[in-house]
Every structure is written in structure tokens, then in C-alpha cells.
Amino acid sequence: MTDNITSVGGGGRPATGVSALKGRTGAGAPAETRGKTTIADGVVAKIAGMATREVPGIHSMGAGMARAFGAMRERVPGGGGGVTRGVKVEVGERQAAVDLDVVVEYGVSIVDVAGAVRTNVIGALERMTGLEVVEVNIAVDDVHLPDEEEEAEQDEGRVR
């Protein structure tokens, strides 16, 4: 790949939260490499969040309070789905690191699910952004039990 990934900013200073793929310029350069492509940290976080949710055995993402606020936000019209909930990324010039907070389904092998998440996240990010993913750290914050959904549904139906 001929692209270089560098931070974008005014006055020679790197901008926070944005990376750019800079191509070669000039008439002799291939058309697909002329110019630059900017990728915001939020884009990297969304890709990582979607790739994590695709893995069987992942129930939800986010640690305790983040999940509670996210559940309320999802019920509010226009509140969004919270794709980046439980995802933190650090994006450098050519590399990225990802931290994930997940809740797994009861009965699955946490080791296998974590391995599948790492494989899926690294594959998606490297394919879609060209960044080298140096690490994917996973914190399993909870295990979702099958009877927890039944209790939540009963609580929603009660008059308070």
C-alpha cells in the first residue's frame, strides 16, 4: 500500500481524533493515491463496535452505568443505538489500539468469544481503514443469564 497515515491538523500540529491516509501526488501517481483520506476516531470506534456485536456470544457492550444510560438513551426517540458504547480507541499515525467492555452470554467459552472478537475487530479495522491494530483489550464486565430477561420484562409491566 502506498498510503501513509498521518494526523491532520492546522499549523503542523496533529488534530485530535482524526487520522489521514496521504497518497502520492503528481501526474505519475496512480489515480487512487492522489489526495488524502481522513478517518475520525469515531469511525474507528464504530467499526470496532459493529465488529464486536457480530460475534456470537456477545450479549451487549459497556460497563454497568454505561449500559444503564445506553438502555435509557435507546428508548428515547432519536437517542441512537449506541454503537460505540463500551468501545475506546487510540488512533496513531499508522496504528490503532482498541479497548472493549462486553457482556457475554452465559454458557459460552469466554476465551473463545474473546478470540473471535479480536479476530473480527482486527480484520474489519485493518481491511476498512488500513490501520495496523496493535492490540484489542477485552474486559468482560458481566455474564448475561437467561432468566435476567424474564425479570426485566416483568419489571417493565408493573405500575410504579
Image: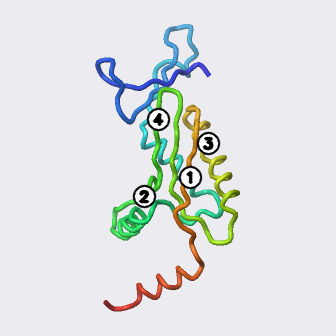
Q: Say which residue appears at 44% left-offset and 56% top-offset.
A: 85
Amino acid type for the residue under numbered disc 2: Gly
Horizontal and vertical percent for residue 27?
52, 8
Q: Which mark is residue 2?
A: none
Placement of 2 over or under 27, stated as above or below? below
Tell me the distance, in whole angstroms, between the alpha carbons under discs 3 and 2: 20 Å
Mark 4 or mark 3, which is nearer the start of the sequence? Answer: 4
Rendered image quadrant of residue 124 = top right
Tell me the distance, in whole angstroms, between the alpha carbons under discs 1 and 3: 13 Å
Mark 1 or mark 2, which is nearer the start of the sequence? Answer: 2
* Residue nearest the observer in this picture, 27 or 71: 71
Q: Nearer the viewer, mark 1 or mark 3?
A: 1
User: Label 4: which residue?
Assistant: 91
Pointer 3 and pointer 2: residues touching (CB < 8 Å)? no
Tell me the distance, in whole angstroms, between the alpha carbons under discs 3 and 4: 13 Å
- Residue density around tag 1, few if under 14, some if 14–19, many if 20 or more, within 10 Å: some
Amino acid type for the residue under numbered disc 4: Val
Tell me the distance, in whole angstroms, between the alpha carbons under discs 2 and 1: 18 Å
SS class of the residue under badge 1?
strand
Picture quarter with the N terminus: top right
Mark 1 or mark 4, which is nearer the start of the sequence? Answer: 4
User: Label 3: which residue?
Assistant: 122
SS class of the residue under badge 3?
helix
- Residue density around tag 2, few if under 14, some if 14–19, many if 20 or more, within 10 Å: some
Q: Nearer the viewer, mark 2 or mark 4?
A: 4
Mark 2 or mark 3, which is nearer the start of the sequence? Answer: 2
Q: Nearer the viewer, mark 3 or mark 2?
A: 3
User: Label 2: which residue?
Assistant: 82
Amino acid type for the residue under numbered disc 3: Ile
Picture quarter with the C terminus: bottom left
